[in-house]
Amino acid sequence: MQLIPFILAFVLAGCAAPATQRCHRYDALTLTRENGFASAFEWKDARGIDNAPERVEVALTVVRPLRGPIEIVHVVGDMEADHWTLTPPDMGNVASSICWVAPPGTMPSCGAVLQTLPYFPSGYYYVRPSGNVVLEAALAFYVCD
Amino acid sequence: MRRRVVVGRGLGLLAMALTQAASAEAQLPVCAQPTPTQTYYTACATGGRILVARLLGDLAVDHLMKADSQPVQRRLGDLLRNVTSDDTRDKNTGLRNALDLLAPLTLTKIDTATGTLLLTIEDDRRRFSGTLEGATTSTTLSWELPPRIGGGYWRTPATIQIAFWAGQRFRFDLESATAEKVSAEIECLAISVDGIRIVTTGVDTPDILVRFDECS
């Protein structure tokens, strides 16, 4: 933790006065064996995701090699609101991958884009492993004012 | 005020996980979510995403694939070596030596996503005072640490958040060459592939944000 002042020293060196930020990362939840790879999330914000650089981030740890795409399903009420079919790139057998699911027009890192805009994160999420051994999946939302 | 309440809630969830580890379902962040009105000291480190992704990927392997009884350890000096250049380290031998003398940071797993963190500090290594040399500027830094720095963490392949227990937090004083002064205590630390967010104790102290992109 002593690295923190080292970071701050260089922040101070920039002489920037404290200020608010336009974009923020909101870490949401993890889907793991402890919660049955399924969990609800409540987004207490009127903002949705509709323009780059806004995005959904899905971080996965999966036993390699993959046996096909992995799906993350988003349910609102009793309806499937969206699902993302993710094919994480093979990065030399590295177990963890980070996928950006972004509005159309941006390069999808794992093949999925947001279908309905604006996208509101509230709802219930679960993993369809499709034959893969998924160890964890985590969701984060990058939202701007 | 709201963010302090959320930190409290996060700590509460983690405490629940500690006492009910067998049925832990607290797969939730432990730091307060950011708010649009929060002010930050900011900096930009454009190469940070790759470095942090590698550190978090290594931690995921250690956390998920080692035996449950085996804690994960990291030396702060090694972490410093991973995130700074040779030139920067050569200019800051005092800090480098202080970090190398510390015991390893120990992460003890509770479940897939959560655990506890502990750094035990010997009495003669709890104080530091020196100058940090950057590329063009220098900053005076001092700290006096408690015997233990500890907290609970929540991790994913893309982030780690650490909420420090009251009385086991890191407190420091900094003064830049331009006379900017900061005295802060770290309440929560969120390291992700998008940046590093440091939540300080007290509503009057700005938080700290190091972005890895969207810097303009």
Image: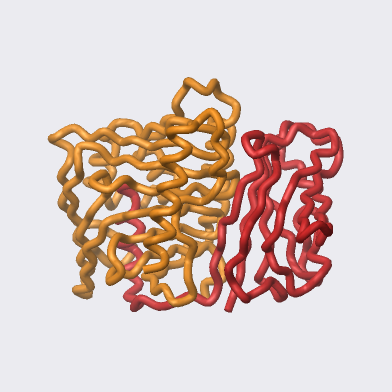
The residue positioned 51% from the left and 51% from the top of the image is B29
- Quadrant of residue A132 within the rendered picture: top right
Tell me if A41 is positioned left or right of B196 in this view. right
Which chain does the red colour mark?
A: A
Rendered location of residue B37, percent (x, y): 44, 77
Q: Nearer the viewer, residue A31 or B102?
A: A31
- Quick check: A43 above or below B92? below
Q: Nearer the viewer, residue B216 or B143?
A: B143
Residue located at (78% from left, 64% from top) = A107
**Residue B25 placement (x, y as % from top left):** 57, 40
Residue B12 lies, in percent from the top left, at 42, 47
Above or below residue A51? Residue B212 is above
- Residue B137: x percent and y percent? 27, 67
Name the colour scheme: by chain
Question: Of all residues shown, which one is farthest toward the left?
Answer: B124
User: Left or right of B101: which side holds A77?
Assistant: right
Residue in the picture at 76% in, 60% down: A76
For the colour orange, the matching chain is B
Q: With B36 as the anchor, is A125 left or right in this view? A: right
